[in-house]
Structure formats: structure tokens, C-alpha cells
Amino acid sequence: MVERIKVRESLQFYIDGAWVDPIWQETLAVENPAIEKVCGHVALGSATDVDRAVRAARQAFGGWSASSREERIAVLQSIAEEYRKRADDLAAAVTEEMGAPVSLAQNAQVPLALAHLSITIEVLKSLPFAEDRGATRVAKEPIGVCGLITPWNWPLNQIAVKVFPAIAAGCTMVLKPSEVAPFSAQIFAEIMDAAGLPPGVFNMVQGDGPGVGVALSSHPDVDMVSFTGSTRAGIEIARNAAPTVKRVCQELGGKSPNIILDDEAFAEGVSKGIAAMMGNSGQTCAAPTRMLVPHTRMDEAIAIAADAASAIVVGDPQGNAQMGPVVSRAQFDKIQGLIRKGIEEGATLVSGGPGRPEGLETGYYVKPTVFAHVDNGMAIAREEIFGPVLAILGYDSVDQAVGIANDTEYGLAAYVHAHDLDKGREIAARLRAGLVSINQASDLAGPFGGYKRSGNGREWGAYGIDEYLETKAIIGYAPEMAD
């Protein structure tokens, strides 16, 4: 493995259209998870920095909220142009800060954000901001100053699905990206600067949860907070926001079921389920982590899963690996503990297991791991592992499969693989999740968000923009239309 020696320094914040120094000079070392070495430093903000950024956003809100649809579209198109210029820089940063293989960074991590931007522009072109219902006009208006708190696993995608809809809605914002993966966010802020947004519309303060996240989510002059991350952290953010009764939009954890039906598409369903589970080293909140197969075909599923998992090339993300490391030692240790727990609880280890893959003594690499004969009461079926660990559970009937699928505190996503589309539709209608994918279909313009402890609110497309709008009824607007 070739060690990277470039050290990145992200030591300023972007506030009111300018790069500024933090109030306090405190930094955090950022580790490259592939080599377990410091690859840079990021400044840690404070409540005072948040105050400064929120003040700038508040001052800019009056003008930006009154901007026209055409002005917002022009700004978003300018961002798209600048984003394309920095695509290679963004991909390199994502690979270094969170371990995404080069192919994943270039073909998914970076392009996904641009895809969401393109969808936002197209939606905004025809999105109705007012409609008349008899004598009453129902108007949609920007909610105000938004605090945006994003995670490290899909760093650019999660920034995109918050920042772009907020801009489209006419809101101003303060972004707090993850301190674990801060460098791609720093480049993103440079893109926003180059795109020529009015000062104060977009602001970014780097930092951790206690220093910046708490201050942002509890700030009395922030009208909405949008958060993506763990359910545990989401609960704390909701508590922080409660005294000021601000809107809270959250996309939280998941333990998504994947029902594979007993039909001629069975083998394909198992193979696709493995691929979807192991992508991004399993660090995806909507990953299909619980695969449900008929008991009568469990052995077949085990054989297919073992072959698919063992074929995954794990290694240096700068090379040709399909799967890189997980993001940090803390994440690595958590995953290893749950793998050991699965073995202790009696699940059948099909592939992978504890420890690093052979030949990878350095770096937070996890073996692609598959357990079979898993009971839904086991820890590996209940807890969000957030790593490349799949649990295969058996069922005797479709009704039982649906019951097992819904027996979770989460409800972010669910999957069905069926040769007969009508059967797939019937099962999808019964699953308690915010997103249900039939045969691994995807739609970035559809609403994304969870039931139960997976959060509230929706992102993506028109639904994402709507989260940043208030609804106003103007009664008597057209008295001639009154009944």
C-alpha cells in the first residue's frame, strides 16, 4: 500500500460570503482510515462561531426569500457548473477522509450530489408556490434560517439533499458537516463561493456535535434544523430544538428488511442483495441488512451469499478494491463487537467473521460478513451495525416474512425481490417503511425518509423542497370566488 503524505488543513469557516478564522483556535486531527495516519486537521467551531453564522443568514434572509424563481435557478445552475469543475478534487477528498474506493467516489459519491442538484433545478422550474382554493390562496413561503447537520458516510450526497432544496425554497442556512469527513465539505463551500451566492445565503461552520451541533439545533434564531445521522443523536437534536419549537427534519438509522420471494428470480435477488449490502462498506442507513428467504431455500441462499461475499475485493481504496475500510477505529471496534455477538448468539457464520481480511494488517478493514439462520431477536438483527454485515433470516410464509420485516424499531427502507411484479407490489404495500424498493429499483426524485425511529420529514425532489416551506392561508384573497 502506498501511503499518502499530503496533509489537508481546513482551518477557516465560510460566513457571510467570506472565509474567516474561528473565534477560538482549536483543531481536530482527521485520520485516513486506510492507513491509520493523520491526513489533515479541521477547525472546531464554537457557539460564538454559530452565532456569527446565524446572524449572517438572518440578515441575508430578507433579500434571498424575496428572490425570484429564475434567480434561484440561475444560482443553482452556477453551482452545478462549479461543482463539475471540482469533481476530481471532491472524489479525492472523499476517498481520503472516509475510505471510499476511487471507483465508488468517482462513480457514486460525487455524481449523486450532482444528480440531486439537477433534479432540484428541474423541479423548481415548475414547482407551484401558491394555489387558490375558492376564495383562499394557499401560499408556500421559505421557512427561514436553517441549520443543516450532515454525516460522514455519504458526505456530499447528504449535504446536497439539504443545501440545494433549501436554496430552491428561498431559505438561508448554516451547514455543519461531519468532523470525521470535513475536507469534501470544505471544497463544497469553495464551490458555493465560486458560484456567486449572495453573502449570507450559505454559511458553513466546521466542528463537532457538542461544540457546533448543539449550538445550531438550539439557536433561537434558527427556524428549522435538518439532521442526518444516528437515532441517538437525532433524539438529542430534537430535545435541543424543542424549547424554540423549530421544525425538525430527521433522517436517522435503519435496519432494512429485504424479502426474497420463492420464485425463479430467487438467485438474482440474493446476489443483488449482497451487492447492495456491501456497497460503501455497509455504511449506508438504507442498506438491506436483513435478508429474508424461505426456510426451504436457506441452503441455496447460503451458497450464493458465500460466493458473492468471498468474491468482493477488499483493500486500498486508492487501488482497484471494491470495498475499502470503514471510517474509523470506533466504527471498526463497534462492528467487530457485533460480529462476535452474532457468533455468541448462535447465528451461522457463512463468510467473513472477526478481524481484518488477510494481508491487511493496517487500516480499518472489515471482512464482508454474512450470517445465516439468524433469529430476529438477535443483536445482529436488531441493532444498526453500519458495516458490511448481513443477517439472513428464514420464513415459512409471506405473511410471516412481512411480520418479521416490520418487527423492528426502524422504518427507513425495505426491499422486495419478486419475479411477479404484482406480488411485489402487494408485499410493498404491507411494509412499514418510508421507502420500499421492488427489485432494487431507485428514484432520486421520490420522497426519502423514515417511519418510526428512522426519523420524520422527507428529502429528495419536490418533497425535499417542501420541507423548507411554510404554508400560509390568505383567506378572502379572491372574495368573488367565495361560495
Image (cartoon, helix red, strand yellow):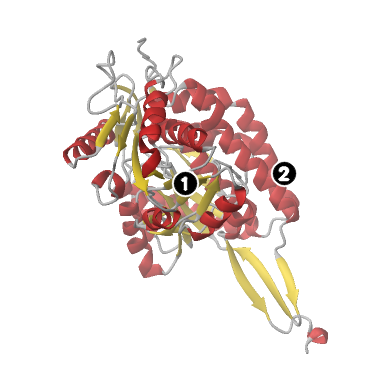
Q: Earlier in the sequence, mark 2 or mark 1?
A: 2
**Which residue type does callout 1 highlight?**
Leu
Residue projecting furthest to the left? 344
Residue in front for this viewpoint, 11 or 152: 152
Q: Which residue is mark 2?
A: 74
Q: Position of residue 284 (x, y in %)?
A: 42, 40
**Placement of the N terminus among the 4 image quadrants:** top left
**Residue at image point 54% right, 33% down:** 190
**Which residue type does callout 2 highlight?**
Ala
Q: Is residue 74 visible?
A: yes
Q: Which residue is mark 1?
A: 175
Residue projecting furthest to the front? 296
Alpha carbons under labels 2 and 1: distance apart: 21 Å
Q: Is residue 128 left or right of residue 273?
A: right
Q: Position of residue 290 (x, y in %)?
A: 37, 44
Residue projecting furthest to the top? 2
**Residue at image point 38% right, 63% down:** 241
Q: Find out whether the residues at labels 2 and 1 contact each other: C-beta distance under 8 Å.
A: no
Q: Quadrant of residue 345?
A: top left
**Residue at image point 56% right, 59% down:** 468
Q: Position of residue 259 (x, y in %)?
A: 45, 46
Q: Is residue 98 visible?
A: no
Where 437 sits versus 360, above or below?
Answer: below
Q: Residues within 10 Å of mark 2 (few under 14, many from 20)?
A: some
Where 468 sits versus 104, above or below?
Answer: below
Residue in front for this viewpoint, 466 or 411: 411
Q: Residues within 10 Å of mark 1 (few under 14, many from 20)?
A: many
Q: Number of labelled discs?
A: 2
Q: Is residue 195 left or right of residue 89?
A: right
Secondary element at image label 2: helix
